[in-house]
Amino acid sequence: MILLLIPLFPLFGFLINGWLNKSMPKGLVGWVASLSVLASFGISVYLFIQLLSGANEFQFTVFDWMAAGSFQVDFGFMVDRLTAIMLLVVTGVGFLIHVYSIGYMNDDEDYPRFMAYMNLFVFFMLLLVLGDNFIMMFAGWEGVGLCSYLLIGFWFKNDNYNEAANKAFIMNRIGDLGFLLGLFLIYQTFGSFNFKEVMGMASTYPRYDSTITAITLLLFVGAMGKSAQIPLYTWLPDAMAGPTPVSALIHAATMVTAGVYMVVRSNVLYALAPFSSEFVAVIGLATALFAATIGLKQNDIKKVLAYSTVSQLGYMFVAAGVGAYSTAIFHLVTHAFFKALLFLCSGSVIHAMYGEQDIRNMGGLKKYLPITHLTFLIGTLAISGVPVFAGFFSKDEILAMTYSHSFLMFTLLAFGSVITAVYMFRLYWLTFYGEFRGTKHQLEHLHESPKVMTVPLMVLAVLSAVGGFIGLPEIFHAPHFLYNFLEPVAAGAGHHVSHTFEYVLIFTSIVVLAIIIYSTRNYYVVKGTLPESDAEEKGIARILSRKYFVDELYAMLFRKPLDVISGLGYRFVELGIITKTVDGIQEGINTAANGLRYLQTGRAGSYLFIMVIGFLALMIYAIIL
Amino acid sequence: MNTLITVSLLGIAAMLSEVFRFKKFIQTVFIAAVTGATGLAVLDWGTSYSYFRFMVLFDDYALAFSILFLVLTLIWLLLSQEYFCNENTRADYFALISFSLAGAIILSSFSDLSMFFIGIEILSVSAYVLAGSNRSDIRSAEAALKYFLPGAFSTGFLLFGMALIYGATGSFNLSNISLWIIANHSNLPVMVNAGVVFLITGLLFKIAAMPFHNWAPDVYDGSPTPVTAYMSTIIKAASFAAFYRLFVSCFSIMADWWTPLLVIAAAITMIGGNITAVYQNNLKRMLAYSSIAHSGYLLLAVAAINQLSKPAMLFYLAAYSVASLGMFTLVNRMGNEQQLDKLKGFAHDNPFYAALITLLTLSMAGIPPLAGFFGKYYVFLSSIRSDLIWPVIVAVIASLIGVYYYFRIVYNMYSKPAASAHVVSLSGFDKSAILITALLTLLLGIAPALIADII
């Protein structure tokens, strides 16, 4: 029963703020929204403690949702250990971002609408992770897609933003089609959508079973859309059109990780389909590298972080693909901490700079924004994988797991994390060091953000710093908390690496990171090199900053041919055939309606007459015929 | 039974209120009694008692429908506040409504043909008077007459049918009739068949199915709008409850023989009702034809007569009636200007309530995930179970035609108003009626099992 409350709180928050909207006292709006998420967080913590002290899982069926013949779907919730972790991330990080939004969005005229959408998003996200069957998950999946659309296009008066929202929605539809087909195939194969039933039945199937391979591949197509993997990733960088808290909550910490959650949730299926798993890992790897290289040459602070998110999601999929499911969740959690932190910091910078997002116009912000600077630095250290910070442990674990899977993958992935460190420190130095390059007006008004924004930053910074200790590597002889916790749900990685390898890995990464930090500082701060303006870019730099021309490629490959086909279809099929048929039917109905109207004479006598005729007709049909 | 007694006493109390001068409180008494009666019905749930020497049987079917009538009446009360304004007539109106409710409850619980007839008469006679209750409007008087004449005519058919059945079987009791028919199934006298056709004719008239529907548009149009809302929801639901109860208790063994009759009537009702509605420019009249068309779908559930048709019918009636009450709230507020284009600008002034009315309209059109969709879905499911494939195809085509005119309502609400037009504005009661009906429509659409699984 208590499970039902978790999504209900944010739903009520949405209803209250959505309903009263601007007639609500402005001060109250943000607190209603934040506290509703905090209430859910409280329940999540309670459930988490119950699970820690031995409970196995909680289950609550609200009602039968759909029933048709043998087809049945319950509106049921389930909290097992995997869900519990997701709940903590969604509600915990969600709450901090809600609080932050109070400061960030306060001046916006549509502030209540924003908060209402955010609550609605949290509601759907909770539905997604709480559902005990694939249909519930799909309902949440579509719901978060809707909220993402609404929030990307939040400032709907700007047409570019609307286009970004459309793009996100359409790209996701492509993925959803795969997801849906996967669901149909699941039902056809197992006759159920319930996670437990499906997984239970699947475990009797042999490895390499072709149906399961097909199911897992189709499900992964869905994940590609939602979690922005090649080839469906292009919407995520554009999604940065939304307000920054949205980027932090939806496009970094929670929604985009839904694909990872789904793969881990279906880990029984993926374990039976080595081909699909390999496919997941390869796509993840390609995305991780590809997006990281693009990140090197972006000059918009949020775009860098966006490509970084795409790349980090790739890491999670690599982990899931090599069978290290708990590692994928580990990185999901730490990434939620430090990426939310980085986005919120960038929001704080943008806030101080009056909406400026181009790092070429920033610089030297360290002394004006001390808290933002410090927390951003912690986030940067965490994402780059500097030891003891959260990202170090999770990324290290992914690398170790990949190493025992394939040496080539390991090398490429390690190269990817070198690039990650480079673009992150490039961003850091350019933003906070050197001379201030903005306008005079901006300089005069530079200010640190209010407490309501900086406190969430500090909390997230602490989490980014120590969050990695939930999963210490073997060499520390401490129990790997997360791995043990998740073991009943996600099989985790079967292979362990030698201690020597661990030491070498840690040592190498420290040395490489030190070199990167030193050289990027040298290049961007000491020498003061600036990224050239768009027109001067040449060669590879130009290809990178234009994102490998993927958008243009898609436009040429898909959009233009589709435009031509739909133009032809409109002219010949629509106007020529369909319109004429439909108009014909409509005219027919209108004529018939007009005719029938005259039966309604308005005289009671004629009604009785028609009744008698009708009775005689019935009598003749029934008795005589 | 307690429910029936409470409602009957309520009618008597309403009449006495005139004499003993507590007319002022009659509305409070009415609400309390109807709520209490609902509670009594809920308390009786799961029992199945017979009264008056097997005249009535309060099983779950009877209780479910009684609860439906009573709850619908409470919602209906919200939109008909002004109807009860007049001090001189309010006691009479409340009495009439109470008696017709008693008739409706009898129609859902009878287990004897004589009770069936009594129920029909109590219900109809109250309705004749209610139709003519607006004495200052000649159209109301005309409606009463047009209702009464064909109504009396159809009562003749019902009586004739009952006489023939009695003649053949020698009993009025439903289970005796059923046993007799089962015993003589191989060699039924034509008297029984003729009796069934007479009964079908009478009942098709009561539910306003084609070709016995002609009275309905005029009566619905001419009656005061609250009365129209009452007739097209509660009275219609009671008629269907009786239709199904009679046929499932007595004649289910010979279903193969009479199913085609109902299916033909259902098909022409669905197609005819929807097509005629297309041409209406008056919202009230459009809803009248739409109500006829909905009778067609419901008739399919009766024709299917299997385990699925009972919940299908109950759910359909609940979904349709709830949405109708919301729609009629709007019609009521439009007063005498019921043209569709008078709705223009409504959405601009009342964006929230326009959205809710859109929701109700979509439910009536049968768009998922609203209640109306699941109503149609259950009806189609039960029809397909009884191998009525082509009627379902006809029903789907008819619903498509329905979408066309339902969307005209939405279209008009969201159009710009003419320059000097007067835009409809809602009272507080109207708003709550629309809100409640819309919420119920949404709730039943999200969790249809709430109703569909109870009987």
Image (tube, rainbow, N blue to C red):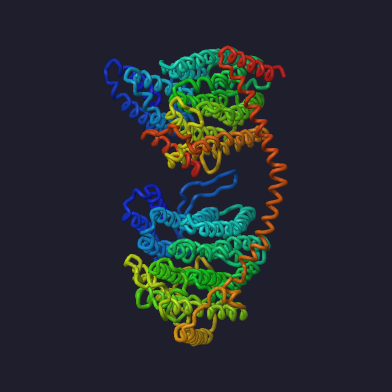
Question: Please, is residue A417 above or below residue A351 in the view?
Answer: below
Q: Quadrant of the N terminus of chain B?
A: top left
Residue A91 place in picture, x, y as percent: 41, 61
Identify which residue, B173 or B137, lies in the foreground: B137
Residue A566 visible in this rendered orientation of the protein: yes
From the viewer's perspective, is residue A6 above or below residue A593? below
Give how far across and how far down residue B424 sits, in percent: 43, 33
Q: Going by the image, does A225 lie left or right of A344?
A: right
- Residue A346: percent from the left, percent from the top? 43, 70
Q: Quadrant of residue A478?
A: bottom left
**Residue at the location (41% across, 18% down)?**
B134
Left or right: residue A102 compared with residue B153: left
Number of marks present in the image shown: 0
The residue at the far left in this view is: B21
Hey, which residue is sitting farthest front in the picture?
A440
| Towards the viewer: B160 or A430 | A430
Residue B67 seen from this side? no
Q: Identify the residue at horizontal 52%, vertical 26% (top origin).
A: B285
Q: Where is residue B253 shown, x and y percent of the image? A: 62, 26
Q: Quadrant of residue A201?
A: bottom right
